[in-house]
Image (cartoon, helix red, strand yellow):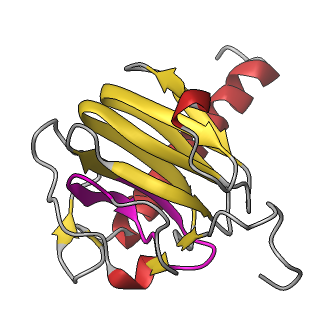
Amino acid sequence: MRKLGIGVVVACLLVVTVVAVAQTLAAHQTPGEKKSGGATHSPVVMPGSEQWMDIPAAALVGTPSVEIGGTLKLAVLQGDPMGAGHSYTLRLSCTDGAKIAPHWHPTTENVTVIKGTFLLGMGAKWDAAAMKEIPVGGFASAAPQMRHYAQCKGDGIVQVSGIGPFVVNFVGPDDAGAAKKGE
């Protein structure tokens, strides 16, 4: 009988461990994750299968300083955007010219442009001339409490991901930038 090298034994043990962990995780996984509204969804979302809805009022704080001027819809792809400490991925659909007034979020917001062109500006006051164009495939990240605003150029879709809660805190033009302590 041949002796097996220590490397072969370790490799076999590693494979058995990985398979056992994968089976354990699969046994404890639910068939669909709950999302806002109680509907279930698959971890795979094919283009065009998003379930679009109005942005929940609970996600909007304050009064926008500019008119939206278009339509904004939201689709939750993964996770719980409103749950503190929970990861989420959502998509925001917007019609040409739709504006998102100056605002900030309590957590980092990561945005990838899926369709159309997204215009992004930094600061508490709307300044169309200062906005940067972000094309399809472009990415932007806003740190917690960073004042920013956006507009869709053409009908568009952006994908937003982060750690909840996903809250849009609108600011007025007199907002100095940094949130007050405790916000």
- Quadrant assignment for the N terminus: top right
Q: Position of residue 70 (x, y in %)?
A: 22, 52
Residue that extends furthest to the top in the rendered view of this protein:
2
Q: State yes or no: residue 72 in magenta.
A: yes
Q: Residue at x 32, y 78 (%)?
A: 56
161 and 18: which is toward the camera: 161
Q: Position of residue 32 (x, y in %)?
A: 24, 67
Question: Does residue 12 appear in the picture of this structure?
Answer: yes
Q: Decide: is 135 above or below 72.
A: above
117 and 50: which is toward the camera: 117
Q: Which residues are magenta?
A: 68-90
Q: Position of residue 181 (x, y in %)?
A: 89, 81
Q: State yes or no: residue 81 in magenta.
A: yes
Q: Residue at x 73, y 54 (%)?
A: 146
Is 108 displayed left or right of 64 in the figure? right
Is 10 displayed left or right of 110 in the figure? right
- Quadrant assignment for the C terminus: bottom right
Is 16 displayed left or right of 35 in the figure? right
